[in-house]
Amino acid sequence: GDAQLDVVRTAEGGMTVDQLGQLVDLFTFSGEKVKVVEICAQRLVDRQNAFKLYKHFDFDSDKQKVKAILGK
């Protein structure tokens, strides 16, 4: 949980939406998954593919949060 999020916070460099999706899938709880997107949003190198992230979330409310974070 928190320790994993701390590791995500310290990671550097850009990442693709697919890589972020794989990272999101490592977390169990939806709140943590949304937090990962929040932490990594500025690192995305292919933001135009952000819609691919939605499949990594089960709840519409989480999908809306991700959409808001990514400004889409």
Image (cartoon, rainbow, N blue to C red):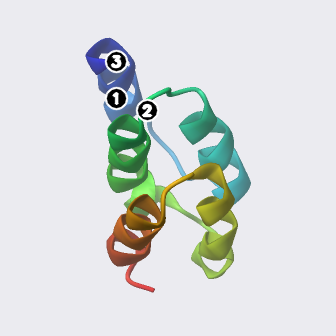
In this picture, is 8 found above or below 56?
A: above
Q: Amino acid at mark 2?
A: Ala
User: What residue is drawn where x is 35% and y is 66%?
Assistant: 65
Horizontal relation, residue 64 to residue 3: left or right:
right
Instruction: Tell me which amino acid carries mark 1.
Output: Thr
Residue 42 in percent (x, y) is at 39, 62
> Which numbered disc, 3 or 1, marks the residue that appears first in the sequence?
3
Whole-percent x, y for residue 44 in the image: 54, 62
Mark 3 neighbour density, 10 Å: few (under 14) some (14–19) many (20 or more): few
Q: Nearer the viewer, residue 14 or 66?
A: 66
**For the residues bearing labels 1 and 2, Cβ distance under 8 angstroms:** yes
Q: Residue at label 3?
A: 1
- Screen quadrant of the C terminus: bottom left
Q: Which residue position holds label 2? A: 11
- Residue furthest to the top: 3
Q: Badge 1 local density, few (<14 within 10 Å), some, or many (20+)?
A: few
